[in-house]
Image (spheres, grey):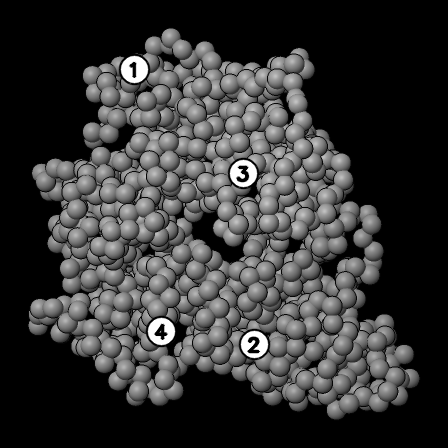
Amino acid sequence: MVLSHTAYSFRFGVLEPQNVLEIAEKHGCTPLILAEINGTAGILPSLHTAKIPIFPATDLRDRGQRIAVLLPESPRGFQHLNAWLSEARPHRLHELPDLPEVRIIYPLSRAPERALKAHEWIGVEEGEQRRAERHPAFQRCLAWTTMAFRGNGDYNSHRLLRAMEQNTVLSKLTSADHLPNAHRWEDMSAVAARFSPVLWAQSQYFLDSLPPWDAQLGKGSGGKNQQTYTGSLAKDVALLRHLCLDALPHRYPKASRAVAERLEKELQIIQEKAFTAYFLINWDIVRYAQKQDFFYVGRGSGANSMVAYLLKITNVDPIELDLYFERFINLYRQSPPDFDLDFSWRDRQHLTAYIFKRFPNTALLGACNTFQYRAVVRELGKVFGLPKFEIDALADGKIPGGDESAQRLLQYAHRLHGLPNRMSIHSGGILIAQEPLHAFSTTFLPPKGFPTVDFDMYTAEDVGLHKFDILGQRGLSKISECVEILKETRPAEAAQLDIHDVQRFKTDPPSLALLKQGGAMGCFYVESPAMRMLMHKLQTASYLELVAASSVIRPGVAQSGMMREYIERHRDPEKRRRAHPILLDIMPETYGVMVYQEDVIRVAHYYAGLSLAEADVLRRGMSGKYRSREEFLAVERQFFRNCKEKGYPDADAREIWRQIESFAGYAFAKGHSASYAVESFQSLYLKAHYPLEYLVATVNNGGGFYRAEFYLQEARRHGAHIEAPCVNDGRTDTCLRPKNRIILGSGRISGIDIRVCRALEQERAQHGPFTSLGQFIDRMHRAEHPLSLDALLLLIRAGAFRFTGQPKRALLWEAHHRLGHKPQAAPSLSLFEEPVRAFSLPSLTHHALDEAYDQLELFGFSLGHPFDLFTGWQGKRSTSVKHWPRHIGETIQILGYLVAAKNSKTVKGEHMQFATFQEHDGQIFDTVHFPPTVKRYVLKDRGVYLLSGRVQDELGYLSLEVDDIERCPMIADPRYADSGLGHPVVQIPKRRAANPKSKRV
């Protein structure tokens, strides 16, 4: 009998499942025992595509040496095997248990000396036949061989993978660590001829005795998700109807007949498609979140659903937005609608723990990491024993001529590129199944602490498991924390604020003004330069226009070349006449341009005459993973056949198909975009009315488009005074104090132990403010996390003891005197504060720039004006952004501090850049750097730049097309002036230049 494995035997196998099955069929190696190494990750992908009979198994190995092969007799045995493997890996694989309905085949060299049990056999290789004939259990010996390689290329790839796994150079890899080169694919008849007839017959009898494997495990026949919520289908249906009708007066106080008909239609199809439990489980999750006061946003195609709106899974009204029902659900759709439930990144772990506790058969969804080319080059470089500088050069594409080892390395890098490397975790997918997840695969336990299946979302969908997306994002955390800050700073207004009153926010003039004027820095999804540019061009001034913009910005519309067309048709009604009349009739709201995911379904159904089932295949095919599948290719052929039958010009059909293809999985469903727009309006409202509170929350939660430095500068523009951390008045997180004082959090100090920051907050809360450095040291020595000298020095350098009125250098002397020699015993609490012995120190000078450089080193930025650390800009001619309208098409100069730079490529593959700068007065402007400029100057480090270029006006949006760049030098670091160094030691992390010959700026 023949054993094999796939590349899902990570860093061991070299062939994808489909390759293994095709080769096995070609050589007549059927049935095939598919024995993955120490797992079952490749079983489901193989079963899904298998055209030959296969028996799933696990090949237990210690390094490269086989311990045993475990072969389940049934799905139940497969489940037991997966459960045991999940517990035993990686250290207990030698402790073989007796698993129900699982057979064990030992290699002859490891056969037990005792009598074999009923489920135990012995595998015999070709060269072991004589020994096997003398074995007392010869009647339970089986002829077996492993086939793994098509030729030397596969064998060499296998050895390289094994060396990677062992973290050793290839020359030190032993024969025990890898398979012999002899394990090559060949005809089954040739293998049989080399074994004795008795052994081969016993093997065939063994295979014939195995019950037929349930191949449906690998195919999505019937739903594998939890089938009921209440335990009864009838009760589920009744509960869902009751919840919807109960919520109807709240969501639709004056429900029209159309609302009632839409609700009835949805409930009927949900019941017919057996999606009732899926909706109720999502409702259960958001209901729990509501009880915990967790902020959340429901989005995805499920946001097109009225039932989801009534259950408060989403906050998007499908009637108001005229959402396309068939994108949400139709009778031909096999999978339930997608619900992406976004929670605060601080709350998601809590929600996940609740789901695992609430539903019994739950696991996180896995994701398969594949070898990427640059990473493979680096791994192979180590295996080949190359020095780091050579590995870096090869990874950067610098190939030395005539170097055979380098050429061989790159050859195998191409072979390994794209192969499975390791399993990891899907960004938010959770599986809730009807039966234990071990019925499908092994699980592993990542640092998150929740079991995770050994297959990805595509395999899950193939077998009929549909994920629940529980995602974490920082935008919601900003909103939630801002509301909490308001309770401290403006309690009366906070009591009146209903952050969920989105209908009011949609028409709030200050919020709409921010949207239109591009003042949305820090606001969810609308703060990036690209989004600001788009909203300016669209003159976005309403919720519905923002919904469209949220989808237009996606790569799908841009790649189709229709973004500009949409903008022009939006601004100029006359240009809407350019639209194809059928497409304009199908999509009047978007002027005949495909913007939303459901537009693809509409066009496929109404323009090309595809059935809704075919259109749904097309929707799924937007994901590149499905594009090569026959079902998608068949729909593509049907699209063109139908267009021809309808008499459409070939050019029109090809153009519309090109636009459909360009979506490539990037397009949003309209309900999804609308959900994003709801969150955007919540953040816009808070930014418009409570800017300082909102910006403090933004700094604390991170995750925005810009660095914290620029959110603090934005706060300064709104009247804030930015201060360094303070042990008496500050917190671990950045906080807002009276008189618009923003105190940076001590947790932002680079290198500090966050536990020390929390401990000092707790000590201050329990025993009052600190009165001196000495008293701080004494009190913090009895804290749960005692103070170290390093932590104290960081706090002093950050300015956290400025309340003492003493110079930093004097405080540093005292700190070293108290903590720098030997550990102190923790003092006991005293009724009276004992005086600390004072020392007389000489006058210690402190340069004005010392503070700025300390801040730059500790926070990553200076709390002063960013221009203050640079020289050479004073007196330079600079045309302010506010004067640009008078200089359109002219060449001007402007000084700017680099905010962000994005590397990109032209259609010809040439490097270019987009950048955002800040003027001295805080105004933001955007620049474009085309390839000729990038070849001379590559923006790398933040700093003050003198930019020269032409002012461009594109649909009312002004930007600078840069021709020349000059970086202003930093002022020498005064902290090192006495040493004669006279230069800054603080270096901002460098990024690799887009072109190696470019001048670095």
The foreground one among 42 and 735 is 735
Which residue bears the numbered disc 3?
771
Measured in 3D between alpha carbons, the distance from the residue under mark 4 to the one under mark 2, in whole angstroms, is: 25 Å
Indicate which disc, 4 or 2, sits on the residue closer to the N terminus.
Answer: 4
Relative to 255, say whether 674 is above or below: above
Q: Residue at x 70, y 38 (%)?
A: 819
Relative to 215, say whether 252 is above or below: above
Which residue bears the numbered disc 4?
284
Residue type, mark 1 in image: Thr
Marks 2, 1: nearer the viewer: 1
Which residue bears the numbered disc 2?
438
Residue type, mark 2 in image: His
Q: Is residue 879 left or right of residue 365?
A: left
**Is disc 1 placed on a helix, strand or loop?**
loop
Indicate which disc, 2 or 1, sits on the residue closer to the N terminus.
Answer: 2
Measured in 3D between alpha carbons, the distance from the residue under mark 2 to the one under mark 3, in whole angstroms, is: 60 Å
Q: Position of residue 106 (x, y in %)?
A: 78, 78
Q: Position of residue 896 (x, y in %)?
A: 38, 21
